[in-house]
Image: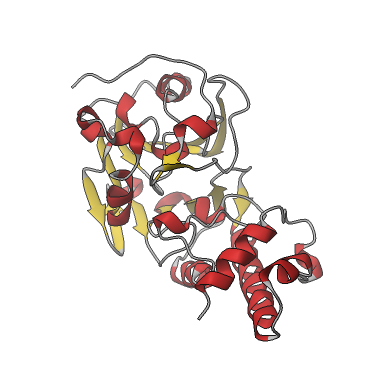
């Protein structure tokens, strides 16, 4: 099956429609199909631009990509891959359903195996961008519900699902022998996350999900976030604590009889989180209020 290779300027609003509505990407592209690449560890790279960070893992037999950015970024990704290896792309792992992470799945040959959590396939089926029957090859070929390992030996990649967070299909992708994890948008950056309730996201279960991941995943030093520079495992642990502090503060405010608006305006967190971006406070607090019993 042929893949479209037409490159064009794109905008996040037009290309990340989810469940019948446009969902703004965590971080818009800086320019038309301008990608960068940086080395994370031996045989592992991160391609930036065009939506979510794309991991490029060079294995013995080919290349595994984690996330494919917005639509029409496939060629830009492939061009960057070719700067580090001549091996073909053999696998794509999608961390979740959003259009800035699965948008260029369709660019790659049908022989490329796509892997994701089972809920990703369900959510993608609701996306207008994939309503065309000719794009079924962009959907996951293999899915899992709790854990799954892709490849083996030195190339083993472990996929973990610990519950709803950003969506209800967030995978934590661990490059086992490199001690690196791609966290997708469950840890997009240091700030309040986007809670995509239309795709099962939950501000109430978010802290539990991150805590389970922090306890259940071992031997990781480096983390590739969904939309920011490479971070450390401690940054990921701290992010879980941040989300716990947010939830606790909101629960306390609701029990005290405060409105969601007042709770958001008075949201007070420990000083260690003073540099975290809080621009989604009003929306997230309102969502958590609705989700709390």
Q: In the shown orientation, is residue 267 left or right of residue 72?
A: right
Can you give x and y, in whole percent of width and height, for residue 83 in the image? 48, 20
Question: Image check: 146 left or right of 244?
Answer: left
Q: How has the structure been colored for display?
A: secondary structure
In this view, the residue farthest toward the bottom is: 255
Query: Residue placed at 71% from the left, 52% from the top?
Result: 279
Where does the image place residue 60, in percent across and percent down from the top left?
31, 35
Residue 101: which quarter of the image?
Answer: top left
Quarter holding the N terminus is top left
Q: Which residue appears at 38% of the width and 14% of the height? A: 6
Q: Compare residues 94 and 65 and report the one nearer the observer.
A: 94
Residue 142 is left or right of residue 147, and the answer is left
Total number of numbered discs in the rendering: 0
Residue 59 appears left or right of 37: left
Asked whether 266 or 42 is in front, the reply is 266
Q: Can residue 59 be seen from the camera position used here? A: no
**Which residue is located at x 72 percent, y 71 percent?**
263
Judge whether 86 appears above or below 150 on screen.
above
Q: Residue 161 location, x and y as percent?
A: 37, 62
Can residue 127 be seen at all in this image of the molecule? yes
**In the image, is residue 230 above or below residue 293?**
above
- Percent across and percent down for residue 200 are 41, 60
Query: Quadrant of residue 286 in the image?
Result: bottom right
């Amino acid at each position: 099956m042929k893949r479209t290779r037409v490159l064009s300027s794109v905008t996040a609003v037009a290309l990340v429609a989810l469940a019948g509505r446009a969902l703004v990407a965590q971080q818009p592209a800086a320019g038309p199909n301008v990608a960068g690449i940086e080395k994370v560890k031996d045989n592992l790279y991160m391609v930036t631009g065009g939506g979510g960070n794309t991991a490029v893992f060079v294995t013995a037999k080919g290349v595994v990509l984690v996330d494919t950015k917005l639509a029409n970024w496939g060629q830009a990704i492939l061009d960057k891959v070719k700067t580090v290896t001549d091996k073909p792309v053999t696998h794509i792992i999608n961390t979740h359903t959003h259009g800035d992470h699965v948008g260029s799945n369709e660019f790659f040959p049908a022989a490329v195996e796509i892997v994701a959590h089972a809920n990703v396939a369900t959510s993608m089926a609701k996306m207008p961008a994939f309503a065309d029957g000719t794009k079924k090859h962009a959907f996951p070929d293999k899915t899992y519900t709790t854990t799954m390992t892709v490849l083996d030996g030195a190339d083993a990649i472990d996929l973990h699902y610990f519950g709803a967070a950003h969506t209800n299909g967030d995978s934590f992708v661990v490059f086992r022998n490199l001690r690196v994890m791609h966290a997708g948008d469950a840890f997009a950056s240091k700030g309040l996350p986007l809670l995509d309730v239309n795709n099962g996201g939950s501000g109430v279960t978010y802290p539990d999900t991150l805590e389970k991941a922090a306890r259940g995943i071992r031997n990781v030093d480096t983390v590739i976030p969904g939309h920011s520079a490479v971070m450390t495992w401690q940054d990921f642990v701290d992010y879980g604590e941040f989300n716990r502090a947010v939830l606790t503060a909101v629960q306390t405010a609701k029990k005290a009889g405060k409105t969601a608006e007042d709770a958001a305006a008075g949201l007070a967190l420990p000083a260690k989180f003073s540099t975290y971006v809080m621009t989604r406070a009003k929306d997230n607090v309102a969502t958590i209020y609705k989700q709390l019993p």
